[in-house]
Amino acid sequence: MAESYTVGHEQAPDHAHAALQHHFENMEQQREASTLGMWVFLVTEIMFFGGMFLAYTLYRSLYPEAFASASNHLDLKLGAINTVVLILSSFTMAMAVYSTQVGKRRNQIISLALTLLLGATFLGIKAVEYHQKYEDSLIPGRIISSRPFDASGVHLLPNAQPHNVEMFYWIYFAMTGMHAVHMIIGIGIIAVILFFSIRGKYGPEYHNPVEVSGLYWHFVDIVWIFLFPLLYLLGRHLEH
Amino acid sequence: MSEHIVPVRVYLMIFLALMVGTALTIWAGLQDFPGPLNVVIALTIAVVKATLVVLYFMHVRYSSRLIWVIFASALFWMGILFALTFSDYWSRDWFQI
Amino acid sequence: MKAMESFEAPTPARVNYLNVTYGLKSWLLTKDHKRIALLYLGSISFFFFIGGLYAMFIRLELLTPQGDLLQSTTYNKVFTQHGIIMVFFFLIPSIPATLGNFLVPMMIGAKDLAFPRINLLSWYIYMLGGIVTIYSLLAGGIDTGWTFYTPFSTTFSNSYVVAAGLGIFISGFSSILTGLNFIVTIHTMRAPGMTWFRLPLFIWSHYATSLVMILGTPVIAITILLLAFERIARIGIFDPAAGGDPVLFQHLFWFYSHPAVYIMVLPSMGVVSELIANFSRKNIFGYSFVAFSSLAIAVFGFLVWGHHLFVSGQSVYAGMIFSFLSFAVAIPSAIKVFNWTATLYKGSISFETPMLYALGFIGMFTIGGMTGLFLATLAVDVHVTDTYFIVAHFHYIMVGGAMFGYLGGLHYWWPKISGRMYPDGWGRFSALAIFVGFNLTFFPQFIAGYLGMPRRYHAYPPEFQIFNVLSTAGASILAVGYLIPAIYLVWSMRYGKIAAANPWNLPGLEWQTSSPPPTENFEITPIVTWEAYEFAPREETEVVGRFREERVEEV
């Protein structure tokens, strides 16, 4: 090996920036790594939900009438409101990123706060829906032992079996429950970003954490974009 | 990566498109279309909405090809899970779909 | 100074990652990827020991045809727990979390991984998963087989399924975070001049492994959750009586668990590429083919899971598709074996301990892989499924393949990691002992399985006893073989000869810094201007004794 291996000079590091972590050469590398990291993480989330979508697709194909009957018993109004709420929150999140990029701190804080509020609203409405299911004895199995699952309140289409209706509700709770868990985590992340935004940590020269949190939030929105029609709109057309 | 700053009106237009899509989904869900068309229409609208979110809200339209490849791979892999599992269920002579 | 001088007079204390700070907190709160690698090394060795204890009970029970040592229910727990510990807590993290964590930044010329704190978090998550699993073992164990098949696991088993599942679920996140870290690091933190095709093949294989971790692990996560909820709430997603399908569980389970075996073997293949090239002092034959074959294995590995479901009730047409794809996945692996062999040809080969493991890998992996092809053949699989043929097949890959690569890599990079040399004589002796012990343990199992001995039974017909006696004898030799390196590696940390920065005068970036390295890996960021395995021209070598040496340029 004739050549020496290090022609020793440093890259010009961004010593100036307080947010630069020491193992990165400069802010650009750090930003690239951070964005790439979030995207790779979202890949894992897609595969995670994918397993549940598979179970849903399989059992819906097998028991279409039962699934349609169960779906019709969900509160379409609340589901629709939640969809609007969540898409709006994605918009406010995008606006938060924009405001940070152009240095409009007040708008940034307002947008983040709105996103937080809308997220909490979504969860609140979900809680109302879950409570309705509890009241109607539609929580599957013996999770609530005092109110075992009872499909008698559900109007059954022809050929629908009650235990397949229970299967639908199991998948409904699993998928919306998992989604809600991710929303709670997302709200936590945005709360942290909001906190630091108020302290003035993010601006046009350092906004990647806001952007990356936005990526996560939009992903949670996308999952709901699919969940809404698949869970709430299955069999409405059969109810005429 | 996304030094590109997306203008507000783009976000606004995408948001409005998503609202239209939502309304369309609900309307279509209440109509009785022949055969499997209800599902097809619902999924198509959902895919379009998701695509708008990915491209514009998540900036994939303005990002490097690597990001695009990563996202597309995830979808492709979910596709593998579905396709090969259903190759079993569609060809069984018991527990039929 | 001759390159093969593997020791030098003790130098004045030099600051490296091991001695830069002392104290428990400096280790438990470290962000240094090298220290995290050692944390993993310790924990993984611990779990290997536990898994090995279970193996010992299996082999002791199977010495005699009667089920006389353990009751059948206890035996069920023993083989289940052997599988769970070895797969999830030893093999899957082994090379990536120890050698990968240590070497990936060094081999690409970076100061650390992209996300050092997430790296530390991944170790804590792994430990948490391990603790939860150990709790399930101590509380009474689990008897479903490491495969957790429904409806036994959901409905009929009286063991700690949910606890064990939870432990595995938690440790899965450790895997995901490691893979995420590697992918981002390799994409964004390569030193100037380190292009993709100058990367060592160790990096390519870890990149491919990380892809599998990212894409597969989430599916086992959701599967375990569904299993746990089904068991707790008795819903019926896998219960035929409620309209569910138990085979759905198998589809979801194996969607991850087949690629998981590639998580276990791909890093090992990366190690073997390094060992073969460096101990033949020759560039790997067909570098880009080997690099792409790692990616191909990662991708194809996701297409074959149905070969675990041939007799489960899966449709025979799907079986044919999976059978065909399972043949296809062997091709990239075979490409590697051919290329390694071609690398050896006219190479300047030396038989230090790591090379012995590498050569052993090639042989054992070939046997394991070939028998995999037999199993991919639908008709043969129907005959030997759930027999010891399967057990022998996967142990050839996992022990003869993954484990050999792990041990070879551990020995090869030991001077870099610890700054010490281990006694190579003992190294070679134990490599040989492991090789002999391993083959004696598992080869008879091929025969017993083919002749019909079923797996997961604590008793068997007397005509199989001879194979089991041979197998247990081999296992005892294997155990001794494992014990010896454990002893001399630990011994060497205190009493071993001090290692030079580049004891075998090799071109890899990790050898261009001191042994052990400083915390930031390189004094100055390297700029790479040479190809991956660029050895000095042969005229510069001279034969001295048994080893070839190169004249060292004073740098």
Image (cartoon, coloured by chain):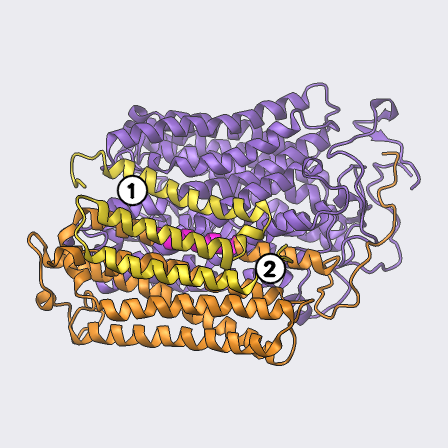
Chain colours: A orange, B yellow, C purple
Per the image, label 1 sits on a secondary structure element best described as: loop
Quadrant in the picture for the C terminus of chain C? top right
Residue A43 colored magenta?
yes
Amino acid type, label 1: Tyr
Amino acid type, label 2: Asn
Q: Is residue C470 left or right of residue A240?
A: right
Q: Earlier in the sequence, mark 1 or mark 2?
A: 2
Identify the residue at image location x=26%, y=34%. Answer: C311
Q: Is residue B32 left or right of residue C368?
A: left
Where residue A43 sits in the image (x, y, percent)? 48, 52
Residue A133 colored magenta?
no
Few, some or many C-alpha atoms within 10 Å of disc 2 (few <14, some 14-19, many ≥20)? Answer: many
Q: Is residue B76 above or below residue A142?
A: above
Q: Is residue C449 left or right of residue C400?
A: left
Range shown magenta: A40-51
Task: List the single residue furthest toward the right.
Answer: C554
* Picture disc at residue C119: 2
Q: Is residue C391 left or right of residue B64?
A: left
Identify the residue at image location x=41%, y=49%. Answer: C82
Where residue C292 sits in the image (x, y, percent)? 58, 32
Disc 2 sits on a residue from what chain? C
Few, some or many C-alpha atoms within 10 Å of disc 1 (few <14, some 14-19, many ≥20)? Answer: some
Which quarter of the figure has residue B7?
A: bottom right
